[in-house]
Amino acid sequence: MRQAGLNNLEIFIAKQIERNGSMPLGEFMSIAMIHPQYGYYINSYPIGADGDFITAPEISQIFGEMIGAWVIDVWLQMGSPNINLIECGAGYGTLMADIIRVGVKIPKFVDLVNICIIETQGNMRDKQKSKLSNYTVSWYDNISEIIANKPSIIIGNEFLDALPVEQLKLGNNGWQQRFVDFDGNGFKLIWKKADKHLLELLPDKTLSNKIYEISKAQIGFIKESSLLIKKLGGAALFIDYGHNKSGYGETLQAVKKHKYSDILKDIGQSDITFHVDFAALKRNIPSYITSPSIVTQRDFLLSLGIKHRAKALINNNIDMEDIIKKQLDRLISKDQMGDLFKVMCFYNGDIKPCGFIL
């Protein structure tokens, strides 16, 4: 194997391929992102203007305040019980901090909330510990580790898109699956016979020679979340960029310093992500769980009163009016995050979650 010009993670992947043969795309993505020594999330702090991308909680506090209002409303509808408040992939802890800051104003809320964070990366946990140092927080590697001994409210903002994806295509030789190969000079994408278990996750109607993206990891996570709220009740809220109708098309991309890059170059130094197929996730929510229609981030935030909150914030910080208006526009404008990002909710119990058509 020629190793000149390869970084440590690329050498590791190349050796795996030489030993075991070409690697499924999903496995490649998982290694690239979370390898315990060389993975992207292990060795970088990607969020923010100086990172590779920016998330809604880092754009403006009003995003987190709206999510906090949603969480509190659901909690009140549940009868104000002792709950697990679970955030999946909490970034730098900003969203959870904003939720708790809103919750402090509600009698007993903070006392009755057990904060849980699903986070596998130690460097990100350190950021979260610093941001949430005034509160008791429990960290987990996977949501299945949380014991369902109380109701749960689960939230995930730009979490699902970081889970691995597979790409499938129907050609003359049947269904093919995308793999990553290494030829001694570099990495390349190839097509091989598809894992038959992935075919079960395809839409009912498919076309030949079109690429379909399937995330078994996302579907598994949604099912695990459903199991957690099945026993004692609760609700889940996931926000991500994606589509609410299953179809074909390649959305897999790498991003570095807010610009697109090659997923097969500088592996472990770019964020690899794709658009979430919310319709596929909704199809796989168990029948014992209720899930209203998927909505856009724009409609969701507007229904929660984000414009009123922005106006109040401007009234108290008149010198920041232009900044607050630009932040609001970025969150809800149709040509920015407003329509690209979708919001999915599911719940178990006598709940009518705000922001959705029930």
Image: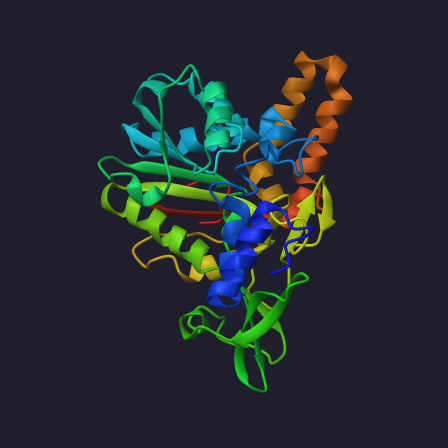
Q: Is residue 310 positioned above or below 143 on the image?
A: above
> As rendered, which of 298 and 118 lies closer to the eye?
118
The answer to whether residue 279 of the structure is visible from this angle is: no
Relative to 176, 145 lies left or right: left
Q: Residue at x 40, y 52 (%)?
A: 222
Relative to 302, 96 lies left or right: left
> As rendered, which of 61 and 142 lies closer to the eye?
142
Q: Residue at x 46, y 32 (%)?
A: 122
Place of residue 164 in the rendered image (x, y in percent of width and height, measured from the top left): 50, 55
Say which quarter of the image contains residue 39.
Answer: top right
Place of residue 85 in the rendered image (x, y in percent of width and height, measured from the top left): 37, 32
Q: Residue at x 59, y 25 (%)?
A: 61
Place of residue 36 in the rendered image (x, y in percent of width and height, measured from the top left): 46, 42
Place of residue 252 in the rendered image (x, y in percent of width and height, measured from the top left): 62, 57
Relative to 317, 200 lies left or right: left
Say which quarter of the image contains residue 232.
Answer: top left
The answer to whether residue 312 of the structure is visible from this angle is: yes
* Quadrant in the picture for the N terminus: bottom right
